[in-house]
Amino acid sequence: KAGVTQTPRYLIKTRGQQVTLSCSPISGHRSVSWYQQTPGQGLQFLFEYFSETQRNKGNFPGRFSGRQFSNSRSEMNVSTLELGDSALYLCASSPDSLYEQYFGPGTRLTVT
Amino acid sequence: AQKITQTQPGMFVQEKEAVTLDCTYDTSDPSYGLFWYKQPSSGEMIFLIYQGSYDQQNATEGRYSLNFQKARKSANLVISASQLGDSAMYFCAMREGDGSARQLTFGSGTQLTVLP
């Protein structure tokens, strides 16, 4: 089975712009979670989608949003980018009934 | 309060020796799961091992074992026969509740370096 894929792998944006990141989960997985990883804050949960519905949300401002499509692929969007949004964004997928999450390689976003 | 605490920012181990990475957790939920992930310099998080709060035995996966001490709220990862490829960042994580919400809370990580 193919693993979790994330596109793009690297991205450079300017302050004030917006960005959309994409995640394709493992085939058959319906849960997709997003995490932000920074040297200062570590790994922080952004949100989780299950069957196209946001089921759980972390403590991030409304500039961070996401959605999930009927094929379980997910996108996250960050509007009005700030320098502090520079991070590795990781997507993870999970089946209905198992516990572990499987992560993709991440998208490294740099905001200048 | 920190939910997951990893007190070792960095660890060194000689190749072929065993190493223990510490993890303590804090939760009042009787149902929870504990995970260990490995993150090489490439960035991808690799799932290593899982322990459920109701599991009676310590989890093992190949060279990885989890030393689960529920009363002490610790879930240490033991890597036996270390290999150079084990050099990476290791994260302990917890999921609270019955699993319907799949949010993981991560510790700050331990950077493991295996010496030849």
Image: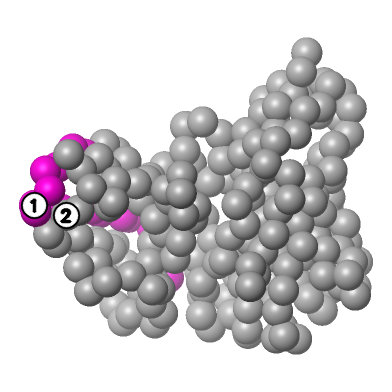
Q: Amino acid at mark 2?
A: Leu
Chain at tag 1? A
Of the image marks 2 and 1, the number of the one nearer the N terminus: 1
**Residue name at image x 25 percent, y 62 percent:** A76
Quadrant of res B29: bottom right
Counting from the top left corner in percent of width and height, residue B32 is at 70, 77
Q: Quadrant of residue A57?
A: bottom left
Query: Which residue has dot 2 on it?
Result: A81
- The answer to whether the residues at label 2 and label 1 have Cβ atoms under 8 Å apart is yes
Segment tinted magenta in the rendering:
A11-31
List the residue tagged with mark 1.
Answer: A17
On whether residue A13 falls in the magenta region, the answer is: yes
Residue that appears at 58% across and 60% down: B106
Quadrant of the frame with the C terminus of chain A: top left
Nearest the viewer among B72 and B55 is B72
Instruction: Give the spatial CA distance, label 2 vs label 1.
Output: 5 Å
Viewer can see residue A58: yes
Q: Around disc 1, counting alpha carbons within 10 Å, would you say few (fewer than 14), some (14 to 19), or many (20 or more)?
A: few
Check residue A14 for magenta coloring. Answer: yes
Q: Can you see residue B47?
A: no
Q: Residues within 10 Å of mark 2 (few under 14, many from 20)?
A: many
